[in-house]
Image (cartoon, rainbow, N blue to C red):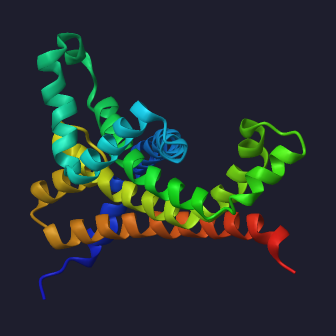
Amino acid sequence: MNFDPIYFLEIFPELLPYVPLTVVMAVLSLVAAIIGGLILALILRAKIPVLYRVAVFYISFFRAVPTLVQLFLIYYGLPQLFPELRAMEALTAAIIGLSIKNAAYMAEIFRAALDSVDKGQLEACKTVGMTSAQAYRRIILPQAARNAIPATGNTFIGLLKETSLAFTLGLTELFAQGKILASASYKYLETYLAVAIMYWLLTIIYSLIQRLVEGRLNKPYKS
């Protein structure tokens, strides 16, 4: 078996410095996707005539187009229409692309989460003098957020993996660094196995954090 365990262990310190960039990309993209997804979900729920059709088109398009194609459209395509975007950095383009794509998925997650909250609660809030905005902010959205956490967690894990596509824009993140090291050493198995383990460890850490958050939010609902 042609496997170098010493090189395999030595490669981890060379990959670690690129973990923060991967995490930052995933976190910023998730935050933007959550904001965009929530806005889209509220538009779908309210069925605002023109905006509703725009939201449906947005979700349909960005869920259908591969992430890599979206990244290329943003980084290489948009500067043809808007020359001022030629100065856009690869990191910015990657975050925008991942945010736009995942906002479409988050919209469906939030729509389902909002639908899971009994519609009678909105009417009950209005009977005690709350406006619709107050009812959503104080009663409906907190419950919907609790129901959306598991699916949102899956989206974040997917985002962690999708950050590896940023190397196609010339950005050196975790996967890109692994690719550089593998090409230099020709030890592909050891290098890519180390990269895979790094992504696995990041997923484990996030899953532990998610369980803690879910446990805290579920305390009021436990008898």
Viewer-closest of 188 and 135: 135
Kindly identify the residue that appears in the image at 23 percent across and 49 percent down: 67
Occupied quadrant, residue 150? bottom right
Q: Which part of the image, by quadrant, shows the N terminus?
A: bottom left
Q: How many marks?
A: 0
Task: Residue 86: give x, y in percent of width and height.
Answer: 19, 17
Residue at position x 46%, y 63% from top?
202
Q: Residue furthest top?
A: 84
Judging depth in this view, the residue of 179 and 8 nearest the camera is 179
Quadrant in which the C terminus appears = bottom right
Image position of 46 with respect to 112: above or below: above
Residues 152 and 197: in front is: 152
Horizontal side, residue 207 vs residue 83: left or right = right
- In the rendered view, tell whether residue 149 sits above or below residue 169: below
Residue 18 seen from this side: no
Position of 67 compared to 212: left or right? Answer: left
Q: Position of residue 138 (x, y in %)?
A: 79, 46
Q: Position of residue 153 (x, y in %)?
A: 51, 62
Query: Residue sitting at 13 percent across and 28 percent down?
Result: 77
Residue at 14%, 29% in the rendered image? 76
8 vs 168, left or right, is: right
Instruction: Name the quadrant containing residue 188.
Output: bottom left
Tell me if 78 is positioned left or right of 47 in this view: left
